[in-house]
Image (cartoon, rainbow, N blue to C red):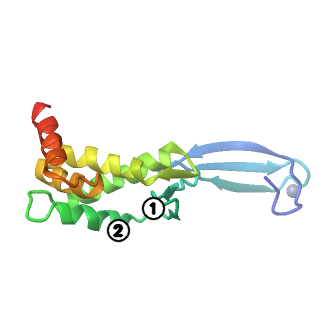
Amino acid sequence: MKCPFCRSDDSRVLDTSHDKRGGTRRRRECKVCQERFSTYERAILDTPLIVKQDGRQEEFDRDKLIRGIQISCDKRPVSATDIKRLVGNIEVNLQEMAEIEVSSRVVGDMVIAGLKELDEVAYIRYAIVYLGLEDLGSIQDEIDTLLEN
Ligand SMILES: [Zn+2]
């Protein structure tokens, strides 16, 4: 941490405080020129890049994910707030993985797990598209699994 007055690297910490957003404020005194200054540190949480099945990478797109889920929830008792909360949780989970890139499957699985708890019909609709369930047999299997749980 360079002193803003003399550019020295040598400072001592007088006081440390933490704020609600996970930041750390430090009051420092430069050992060379004795000037005092404050620094503020905050971890930057980056959402990993999403790697699609064809190998292309894309930024995590919160709005796109929300739209996809909304389609599955059409006319179902799932509120916009529920969907936003689900996507918010997914985003936090992705950030906490602290990976540079994550397969789109991981994101899809998180959506499926979340929808399963919110609404079973919305879950099945999403699963049909996402898992690529193409025939009635595999859709039936998925519904059977759901009914067993
Ligand atoms: Zn200094």
Say what amino acid the circle numbered 1 marks. Answer: Phe
Packing grade of label 1 (10 A; few <14, some 14-19, many >=20) is many
Q: What SS does tag 1 mark?
A: loop
Taking 87 as reference, is 127 left or right? left
Residue at x 13% of width, y 47% of height: 120
Q: Position of residue 27 (x, y in %)?
A: 69, 49
Residue at image position (16%, 48%) is 139
Front position in the image: 140 or 146: 140
User: Which quarter of the figure is the C terminus placed in?
Assistant: top left
In this picture, residue 88 sits left or right of residue 139: right
Secondary structure state at the residue bearing disc 2: helix
Q: Residue at x 82, y 57 (%)?
A: 3
Residue at position x 45%, y 49% in the image: 94
Q: Is mark 1 within 8 Å of ligand 1?
A: no
Name the residue beneath numbered marker 1: 60
Residue 7 in the figure: left or right of residue 124: right
What percent of the width, then of the height, locates residue 143? 13, 42
Give the vertical position of 64 relative to 40 (above or below). Answer: below
Question: Residue 78 falls in which quadrant of the image?
Answer: bottom left
Asked whether 1 or 87 is in front, the reply is 87
Give the residue number, with chain letter if any, for mark 2: 64
On screen, residue 91 above or below 61: above
Question: How far apart, in angstroms, are the residues tagged by discs 2 and 1?
Answer: 9 Å
Residue 18, how many percent across, how many down?
A: 55, 45
Q: Amino acid at mark 2?
A: Lys
Observer-nearest of 88 and 24: 88
* Ligand 1 - quadrant of the structure image: bottom right
